[in-house]
Amino acid sequence: MKHASSLSANEILELIFKHLNEISYLREYDDIIRVLADMGRALTSSDRCTVWVVSDDKKKIWTKVAHGIDAIEIDIDSGIVGTSITEGKKIIIDDVYTDERFNEDIDKQTGYKTKSMMVIPMFDKDKNIIGAFQAINSQNSDSAFDVRDMERLMLASTYAADTLVSARLSKEIEDTQKEVVFTMGAIGESRSKETGNHVKRVAEYSKVLALACGLSAEEAELLKEASPMHDIGKIAIPDAVLNKPGRFDEHERAIMDTHAELGYGMINKSTRPLLKAASIVAYEHHEKWDGTGYPRQLKGEEIHIYGRITALADVFDALGSDRVYKKAWCDEDIFQLFKEERAKHFDPLLIDVFFDNLDQFLEIRESLKDEF
């Protein structure tokens, strides 16, 4: 790697854009912090860089990922980094052990010996301190950071601040979406006199099936978060039909069966991945492998994998739970039905996966059992 001190202006910009492009594909806050630290080290002649973030309560600063360092959390006014953050000032020191502000505990914790240090506070657009960018141990010939290093770390900190603010906002939006999706799913179930634990169990069953049939961890988590919305369309079904204690007549069944399309219509316009996944689940979880399901009589792999997975998870939980129109089935009857409905109602691969992972399903059911 080219030494930072010899980088041209164009090379500096190329490095910044390279790292920002990498960040654009990341979802996890910790991964973003790691790449920002990589960018800082590439731009400065430092052995290590660390991005510190102010905690939500403004009492701590933390870093999850740093070069050679595990998770660390310290008081916001502790050490040189804390001083930079609380005073909002840039700090550059040739030998930290001659500075009374230096906190030796981190060196003792990590086994790493700090000598020179440079710290730049990071601000959001409203001039609020959100953290600090720290470079440690200059690789310059005199082992000290210079003005050029400071300028480059300031440049890195500007991009880092904007990136962290955007990432935090995106995380807040995503967390809010998840909360709304789960709450709406629970509302749909509560209107039909089901318990909130039904949607929790279906979510967990769906994740187990997704992982076991080869979906990525990220996609399995997405399905887990989306599956509580499978019956959101029930919100639009009249109570007299929804809560009828007994079998539906032909007219009532037709009304109830509209809930899949109604649910899809409520959320299918969203471009956000979570709601797009939820719209698929709502639309297709009553389709059947042999094409006899509803609303579109899709067959086999025409049914999205999200719909096939949620269908099995939903039926397993529904059969094993008391409902207004029936008592819970015993496990033996549920298992027999699943074997009979392999390649009829359900994807045959998913039935095999279900039985291969039966212990996990039973553990989930027990841990999230209904309390009356």
Image: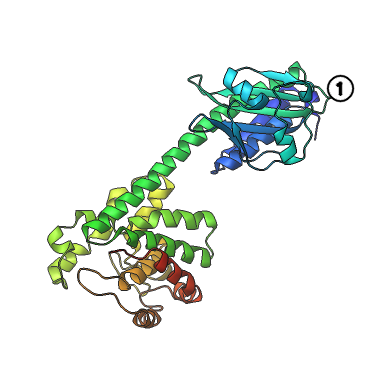
| Drawn side of residue 279 relative to residue 31, left or right | left
Quadrant in the picture for residue 36 = top right
Residue tagged 1: 142
Quadrant in the picture for residue 9 = top right
| Drawn side of residue 308 relative to residue 19, left or right | left
Residue drawn at x 35%, y 56% is 228
Quadrant in the picture for residue 120 = top right
Please provide percent x and percent y for residue 311. 36, 67
Please provide percent x and percent y for residue 300. 41, 71
Q: In the rendered image, is residue 124 in sight? A: yes
Residue drawn at x 67%, y 34% is 37
Q: Secondary structure at mark 1?
A: loop
| Drawn side of residue 166 relative to residue 338, left or right | right
Q: In the rendered image, is residue 7 in sight? A: no
Please provide percent x and percent y for residue 304. 41, 62
Would you place residue 194 above or below residue 116 in this image? below
Number of numbered markers: 1
Please provide percent x and percent y for residue 19. 64, 35
Would you place residue 200 above or below residue 129 in this image? below
For the N terminus, which image quadrant? top right
